Image (spheres, grey):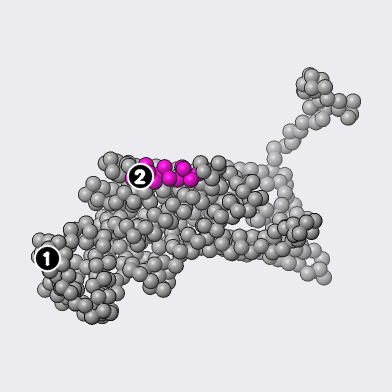
């Protein structure tokens, strides 16, 4: 093998780079996920859990546009129940804790929603 | 035909993933195949590099485009004809990061009959750059599913990439750029007759595969969402060798399609032209200094060199030559 030293150095650098997530997480973090179960008092949400997990941002976006841009505060009828289009009163009414609810998944999945640019982060109850 | 076979291969990967995820084979597609693919990638990549490194390099063969180092009153062009290791590294860096040699791409066209016109052709360079850099940024972005805590670099790249803040979640500029540049690269193989003539299935397949990955990725982010925290649980679980219970995570069929396409890409990587990722560094026309006369280069081939002289060859194939009725000049 020609230039053995350089080739082996190159292979080692390659392995260090591609295995970055493993050694980085091993050194600074944890592979097991944090407890992501949402802490809530409510039994049911405006839609089922799977839909809310994947699509809550669209619902909030729609409500935000209706309220802030079109001055339409609802109420909105979902599955036979009336809800006010409000993050503070409807969502946070059940999901009272930012730390124990929103924050958990958003930090874990590195999502930075715009909610708290206008809304005050709710005080912990 | 080559294109059709490749397209069908990619489409069948998508269909298999949908059927498999629906039939309760989540563990196969979410755990077993990804592990097998990563192992294939790591072992295959290293073996390829070692194989290339084993070929003898008897002589410096850099492809140069400028004045070599010569007498002191002749101006040397270090980037065109590197003489020292530093110059080689510099030229290589420009090649790897900015595709410098492709920037010089020209095209020859027959204009109005017998007039052959040569001209610059920067389009391939431009779309190649857009494609590769977008791919790198998308790769870095995806580290948010594979690192905990997420490094500042990844968050920073995401912030810059979603700068235009269109839609929710914000559309990434590279998502669009990757699909546009891929479309151009695929279109080039269809529309340019010369390129179409030399295009093999191995040329179409990676393009369609990456197009499939990019489009399923865009669908997952913007149109058919799934639980991202669950996706990260799977990613981190795989890295920590303790995969989560996939039945409970309930990730969508489209996610499994995206994952199986990526799995196929990873496994296919060391077996294909995609190895130019490592190969560009191993290329003797790029990584050697043009110092043939200044430095003594000893022939690394085993000595004495095994030769096959004409007389031996003629003797060995005497009967075949006679049978075919050839008359050799030297007879």
Q: Residues within 10 Å of mark 1 (few under 14, many from 20)?
A: few
Residue for point 76% across, 59% down: B112
- Dot 2 corresponds to which residue? B17
Tags 2 and 1 both on a single chain: no
User: Helix, strand or loop at disc 1?
Assistant: strand
- Dot 1 corresponds to which residue? A81
**Residue range (magenta):** B6-18
Q: Residues within 10 Å of mark 2 (few under 14, many from 20)?
A: many
Rendered image quadrant of residue B220: bottom left
Mark nearest the camera among 2 and 1 is: 1
User: Helix, strand or loop at disc 2?
Assistant: helix
Asked whether disc 2 touches disc 1, contact meaning CB atoms under 8 Å apart, the reply is no
Left or right: where B152 falls relative to B322: left
- Relative vertical location of residue B298 with respect to residue A36 in this rendering, above or below: above
Residue for point 43% across, 56% down: B214
Q: Chain of mark 1?
A: A
- Relative vertical location of residue B195 with respect to residue B321 in this rendering, above or below: below
Left or right: where B245 falls relative to B283: left
Looking at the figure, which quarter contains the C terminus of chain B?
Answer: top right
Give coordinates of residue B26: x percent, y percent: 29, 44
Q: Main secondary structure of the magenta part?
A: helix
Q: Is residue B212 visible?
A: yes
Give coordinates of residue B321: x percent, y percent: 80, 23
Looking at the figure, which quarter contains the N terminus of chain B?
Answer: top right
CA gap, disc 2 and disc 1? 38 Å
Q: Is residue B281 visible?
A: no
Q: Chain of mark 2?
A: B
- Decide whether residue B304 is among the magenta residues: no
């Amino acid at each position: 093998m020609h230039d053995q030293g350089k080739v082996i150095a190159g292979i080692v650098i390659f392995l260090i780079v591609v295995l970055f997530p493993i050694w980085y997480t091993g050194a600074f973090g944890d592979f097991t996920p944090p407890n992501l179960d949402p802490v809530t008092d409510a039994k049911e949400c405006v839609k089922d859990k799977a839909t809310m997990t994947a699509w809550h941002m669209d619902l909030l976006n729609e409500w935000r546009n209706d309220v802030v841009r079109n001055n339409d505060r609802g109420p909105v009828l979902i599955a036979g129940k009336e809800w006010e289009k409000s993050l503070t009163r409807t969502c946070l009414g059940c999901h009272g804790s930012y730390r124990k609810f929103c924050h958990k998944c958003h930090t874990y999945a590195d999502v930075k929603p715009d909610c708290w640019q206008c809304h005050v982060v709710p005080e912990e109850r | 035909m080559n294109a059709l076979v490749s397209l069908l291969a990619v489409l069948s990967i998508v269909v298999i993933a949908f059927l498999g995820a629906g039939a309760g084979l989540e563990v196969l597609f979410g755990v077993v195949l990804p592990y097998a693919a990563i192992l294939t990638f790591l072992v295959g990549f290293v073996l390829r590099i070692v194989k290339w490194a084993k070929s003898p390099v008897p002589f410096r063969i850099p492809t140069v485009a400028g004045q070599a180092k010569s007498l002191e009153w002749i101006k040397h062009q270090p980037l065109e004809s590197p003489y020292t290791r530093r110059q080689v590294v510099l030229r290589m860096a420009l090649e790897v990061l900015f595709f410098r040699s492709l920037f010089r791409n020209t095209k020859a066209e027959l204009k109005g009959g017998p007039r052959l016109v040569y001209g610059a052709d920067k389009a391939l360079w431009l779309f190649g750059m857009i494609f590769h850099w977008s791919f790198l940024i998308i790769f870095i972005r995806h580290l948010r599913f594979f690192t905990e805590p997420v490094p500042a670099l990844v968050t920073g790249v995401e912030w810059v990439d979603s700068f235009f803040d269109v839609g929710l979640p914000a559309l990434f500029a590279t998502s669009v750029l990757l699909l546009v540049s891929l479309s151009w690269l695929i279109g080039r193989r269809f529309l340019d007759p010369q390129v179409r003539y030399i295009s093999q299935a191995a040329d179409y397949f990676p393009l369609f595969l990456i197009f499939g990955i990019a489009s399923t990725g865009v669908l997952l982010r913007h149109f058919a969402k799934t639980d991202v925290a669950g996706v990260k649980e799977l990613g981190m679980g795989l890295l920590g060798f303790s995969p989560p219970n996939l039945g409970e995570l309930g990730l969508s069929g489209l996610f499994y399609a995206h994952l199986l396409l990526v799995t196929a890409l990873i496994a296919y990587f060391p077996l294909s032209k995609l190895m130019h990722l490592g190969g560009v560094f191993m290329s003797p026309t790029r990584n050697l200094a043009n110092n043939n006369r200044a430095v003594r280069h000893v022939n690394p081939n085993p000595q004495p060199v095994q030769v096959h002289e004409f007389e031996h060859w003629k003797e060995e194939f005497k009967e075949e030559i006679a049978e075919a009725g050839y008359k050799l000049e030297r007879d």
